[in-house]
Image: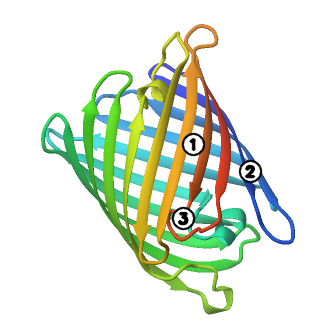
Amino acid sequence: MFKGIESTLAFTQYHYQQNPQNIEDNSLSLTLKNSHEKLLWDFKLEQHNSEHDFISASLNSIYKLSDLTLGVNLKYHNKTTQTPELQANGMMNSWELNLQKPLSHRIQMGASYKENHYQNQDQTQLGNSQHVQLNGNYILRAGYPDININNYLTINRYDWIVQNNLLPKNFWELGSQISIGGIAQNTLHRSWKPFGTIGIAINDQQNIGSSLSLGIAGMVKGEDLLSVLLNYSQGVGVITNPVYGVALEYRF
């Protein structure tokens, strides 16, 4: 679209099993991403058709120093997965600061701090939260099919607005994810290539949770990339009900 800027058009659909009726969220998004080596950023604008139609936006930036990476992320009216009620009807404004430091060419450690403000799609204010995360990433194999192992520990604190008590209790979570072929989702290539991620987590609110993402990506014509992604999760965070998602992304 512009020199040095990559654009992605994506359609995402989620179904939420809520009583007395199921809720559906359909969204169409445009993402712009630059390719500067030292300062990377991506901006996303998304139109949601749900219980109440709304627009969300996010800006993620990464500044690379010699041996340290600094990231700042800002979100406006983004979807949130904190509880089943928030997942179906809520949205959040947030800011996040994170640091990443490589220990070797295969191992990277990181830490982040994040603050969220929650509200329903009808603008009802719900409360705030603070999150601290420590993570470590190990590159088991570079080059497709690339294999990455990520382990994390999160500490989560919530401040409720009493009359709208939809936020979870404070909790910590320990989790691990293995991703295979993730490069296929983010780089241009002519052949169709599969990719996927499987995860497991345990916290002090649930027993054991799991997540699974499977997808395939390939070139349609010229310098573009189409990817199809299926998502499933249950018991990750504080959501016990299973969550299913389907996403289509077209990058050009």
**In this picture, residue 140 sits left or right of residue 50:** left
Q: Nearer the viewer, residue 233 or 185?
A: 233
Seen from this angle, which residue lies furthest right?
20
Q: Nearer the viewer, residue 123 or 180?
A: 180
| Amino acid found under the numbered disc labelled 3 | Gly
Q: Quadrant of residue 53?
A: bottom right
- Mark 1 Cα within 10 Å, few/some/many (few <14, many 20+)? some
State yes or no: discs 3 and 2 in contact (Cβ < 8 Å): no
x and y, in percent, of residue 5 in the image: 48, 25
Question: Who comes first in sequence, dot 3 or dot 1?
Answer: 1
Please name the residue shown 53% across and 56% down the image: 75
- Mark 3 Cα within 10 Å, few/some/many (few <14, many 20+)? many
CA distance for labels 3 and 2? 25 Å
CA distance for labels 1 and 2? 13 Å
Against 77, residue 6 (above or below) is above
Residue on which the image places disc 1: 44
- Element assignment for label 2: strand
Question: Who comes first in sequence, dot 3 or dot 2?
Answer: 2
- Mark 2 Cα within 10 Å, few/some/many (few <14, many 20+)? some
